[in-house]
Amino acid sequence: MLDDPCAAAVPFYDLFHEDGHVPAIRELLPPLLAGVRRGVIEIGAGTGLITEVIARATPAEIHAVEPSPGMRSVLVNRLARDPELQRRVTVLPCGGLDVKVDEPAGAVVMISVLQSFTADERPRLWRVLAGQLEGDGRLLFNWRDRRPPAPETEPGVMGTYQVGRHTYEVAGQVLDVTGESVTSRFLYRVRHGETLLSEDEVVSTAHWPPSTAVAAELKEAGFVQDDAPDGMQVWRAA
């Protein structure tokens, strides 16, 4: 059986992200995909929230890359509700470092996944993605500099969501900060009134390099920066 570190987060994923970056991305991303007609590679498709945004913005075939079996199961079920999406979206069970599609893509989209890659992995990631893009193809991702957080003694509630008679709660706590790497503890809780029905813990490390470091890596990989709205970055393959 496959080990899925994202399994605990799957039931909370849409609730939490609809309350976070997804509404803004629905506004920011479509104009950046204008004119894209060849394939789009989406790195870290999750449950398909952004996949739907991409599909509405361009008629291109979509390659949705998602390593988590739990996330993929929700994604495929989402596609099954729309015959046109089911025809046009191919789900790839791999990560960004291993993506390979048959024809050059017109764009690569990465939304809130860059922090999953370590400093050692990112140069390889840029080379892999450059090799998948057609000439002048676009690399689109959201990124902004953030102040380093401080370790916390207790988890704080990040979001609560009512689903029927149950309350779904996400709590988080920063455990350690070393350079660009931030290790955090997340608790996923389901309550019925005052009764705790379930609680799952996930400890994970995210990586938050400054934009200047990301830019230097991309230029080294042969990308050229283009104009983008605040919070987004657009780079073109040379």
Image (tube, rainbow, N blue to C red):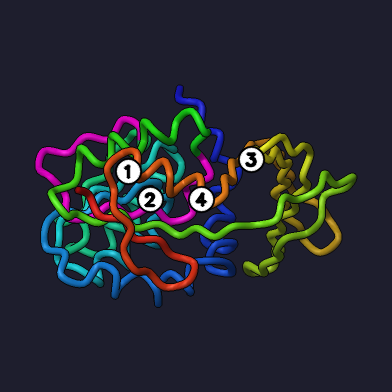
Q: Quadrant of residue 68?
A: top left
Sooner in the amino-acid sequence: mark 3 or mark 2: 2
**Amino acid tagged 3:** Glu
Residue at disc 4, secondary structure: helix
Select label 4 or label 1 by which is in front. Answer: 4
Which residue lies under the disc numbered 2?
45
Q: Identify the residue position indicated by label 1 in the image.
A: 65
Residue range corresponding to the magenta coloring: 97-116
Q: Secondary structure at mark 2?
A: loop
Q: Nearer the viewer, mark 4 or mark 2?
A: 4
Q: Nearer the viewer, residue 218 or 18?
A: 218
Residue marked by disc 4: 212
Q: In the displayed structure, would residue 98 be above or below residue 66?
A: above
Mark 2 or 1 closer to N-term?
2
Horizontal relation, residue 100 to residue 155: left or right: left
Q: Nearer the viewer, residue 108 or 82?
A: 108
Contact, CB < 8 Å: mark 2 with mark 1?
A: yes
At x 74% / y 44%, what residue is drawn?
199
Query: Given this view, does label 3 or label 4 mark the residue nearer the observer?
Result: 4
Q: Residues within 10 Å of mark 1 (few under 14, many from 20)?
A: many
Residue at image mark 3:
180
Q: Is residue 99 magenta?
A: yes
Estimate the spatial distance between the alpha carbons at disc 1 and disc 3, rounded to whole Å: 25 Å
The residues tagged by marks 2 and 1 sit, at their Cα atoms, a distance apart of 6 Å
Q: Residue furthest top?
A: 1
Amino acid marked by disc 4: Thr
Labels 4 and 1: the sequence-earlier one: 1
**176 left or right, relative to 71:** right
